[in-house]
Image (cartoon, grey):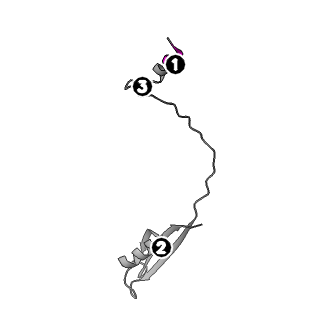
Amino acid sequence: MFAGSVFSQRMEKPEGRLAVHIPMVYEKVTPEPMRWEYYVLAIDTYKQSLVDAERLNKLGREGWILAGILDEKERGSLVHYYFVRQVAE
């Protein structure tokens, strides 16, 4: 038997396709930490209406993501909208 035919027999899968070993190379790289900025929009519901979809869409186009809402009904009339976005470098 030829050495070439032994090699092809070992490398061949049962379906008839060749199984080629591709080595993986790992490099230890420390990624830069992500930097974030925050924006808090406070609305006094006695003086203003809540934020509408138009304003939320405008903030979204600017890259802001709504992270949470805090309604202070028990202590007053403020509603806080918390936004976050990644700092563009």
Q: Which residue is more in the foreground, 13 or 5? A: 5
Q: Which residue is mark 1?
A: 4
Q: Nearer the viewer, mark 1 or mark 3?
A: 1
Q: Amino acid at mark 2?
A: Glu
Q: Residue at x 37, y 78 (%)?
A: 54
Q: CA distance from mark 2 to mark 3?
A: 52 Å
Q: In the image, is residue 36 part of the stretch drawn in magenta?
A: no
Q: Amino acid at mark 1?
A: Gly
Q: Dot 2: few (<14), some (14–19), or many (≥20) neighbours within 10 Å?
A: few
| In the image: residue 74, left or right of residue 38 | left
- Extent of the magenta region: 2-6
Q: Residue at x 42, y 76 (%)?
A: 58
SS for dot 1: helix
N-term-proximal mark, 1 vs 3 = 1
Q: Which residue is mark 3?
A: 13
Expressed as whole percent of the image width and height from the top left, the position of residue 80 reads 45, 76
- Which quadrant is the C terminus positioned in? bottom right
Expressed as whole percent of the image width and height from the top left, the position of residue 31 reads 61, 53
Q: Which residue is more in the foreground, 85 or 39? A: 85
Q: Dot 3: few (<14), some (14–19), or many (≥20) neighbours within 10 Å?
A: few
The relative height of residue 25 versus residue 17 in the rendered view (above or below) is: below
N-term-proximal mark, 2 vs 1 = 1
Q: Which residue is mark 2?
A: 62
Most extreme residue toward the top is: 1
Badge 2 vs badge 3, beta-carbon distance below 8 Å: no
The relative height of residue 43 versus residue 83 in the rendered view (above or below) is: below
